[in-house]
Image: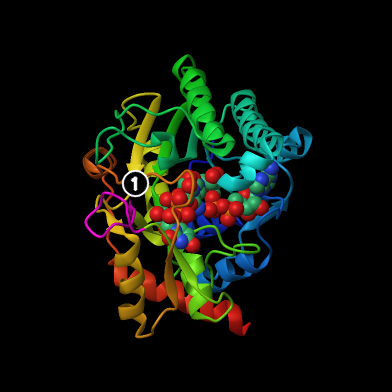
Amino acid sequence: MNNRRVLVTGGAGYIGSHTVVELIGAGYEVVIVDNFSNSDASSLEGIAKITGVTPTFIEADCCDKAALREVFERYDFSSVIHFAAYKAVGESVAMPTKYYHNNLLSFINVVELMKEYHRPNIVFSSSATVYGDAEELPVTERTPRKPATSPYGNTKQMAEDMLRDIVTVDDELYGIALRYFNPIGAHPSALIGELPRGIPNNLVPYITQTAAGVRECLSIFGDDYPTPDGSCLRDYIDIVDLARAHVVAIERMVAGKCEEHYEIFNIGTGSPVSVFELVKGFEAANNLTLNYKVAARRPGDVTAVWADTTRANEVLGWRAERKLDDTLRAAWAWECHVRNR
Ligand code: NAD
Ligand code: WQD
């Protein structure tokens, strides 16, 4: 079995493309499967420009088991990183079937084929959303999950549970769930980054599009939260740091270092940052002024969530390294690149 080749589902997407770059940099060969439902071939071109390597790419839907089977038939790899999923929280509330179908069926197909083809290792993209409005802060991996408040969040909880149940009764299979906090930024080359379709839901793309004049004004959703400056607190993790966490997780699995068949790691910085701090940080890092106003709270937002990263630091041997101002410069450089291409 080829321990140096990794199947990356959703590898043309935001986190996937950055992870592919880091995998290639670490000497892995990568096979990407993506159906371009939320990405396009420009990320593959960016990967090739950054690394000098054109990764193998198969345009396929992970819900199409026959198409996915062909990938397992054709390529030998010991590990899978499963990114392929829909991720828009609001859309999942309006269109739950779309989310349950894609996020759960693609996951089940991947793990069934891994079992059938004796491919032992899977890293699953989970989310801090599983903690909901947590009772203790920062959250550790043992902090109880709260009932999901969206179908999207529910798909992450359900897939985590399925993964735990499947790998703990199987001598061959190992699963690592990485719970990402708020991924932001772009590759320092500005050749790959986040490509939101339509009006961005997330803070940083909204900020960069406002700075670029695509959006008129950023709304800060609430300044009356019980936090030092009244805005929400989050743990913003640089996308390259996040991508590196996947490489470290794969290294752990292929080296046979997992202590349990199912392991969970929080992937964040461990430091809370408020919306106002992020906006001011963006202005200072890029020497510009942003048009923003305070607006009503956004329904469903939790006041604060940030990671206890002790387990990722000590057990996984990973920690966030990039400084927030560098991340915010990279986010702006990427936005400028997108506007100029
Ligand atoms: P993204 O939309 O940029 O990337 C997902 C990729 O998967 C896209 O390229 C899309 O075309 C592809 N895809 C979706 N369904 C597919 C299918 N059935 N078959 C093949 N390809 C499919 O999103 P992202 O931000 O890179 O997120 C990657 C993963 O991380 C997702 O599972 C997401 O839920 C999870 N996650 C993201 C965040 C975040 O804030 N970005 C936070 C926590 C967890
Ligand atoms: C961050 C902060 C907003 C936009 C989401 C998902 C979560 C995970 C990460 C996938 C909040 C404020 C935002 C704006 C604002 N994704 N904000 N004005 O909600 O923490 O997490 O992405 O798993 O599941 O829910 O991220 O970037 O939307 O918001 O003031 O225009 O910015 O209120 O406090 P969130 P976000």
The span shown in magenta is 223-234
Instruction: Name the magenta segment's main secondary structure.
Output: loop
Give, as a three-letter code, the residue at label 1. Thr
Residue 94: x and y in percent read 67, 41
Q: Quadrant of the C terminus?
A: bottom right
Q: Nearer the viewer, residue 158 or 114?
A: 158
Q: Nearer the viewer, residue 195 or 11?
A: 195
Answer whether residue 230 is visible to the viewer in this image: yes
Residue 77, relative to residue 288: is it above or below? above
Q: Secondary structure at mark 1?
A: loop
Residue 227 counted in the magenta span: yes
Residue underneath mark 1: 303
Residue 251: x and y in percent read 38, 43
- The residue under the point 53% across, 27% down is 158
Q: Is the C-beta of the residue carrying label 1 under 8 Å from the nearest atom of ligand 2?
A: no
Residue 29 counted in the magenta span: no
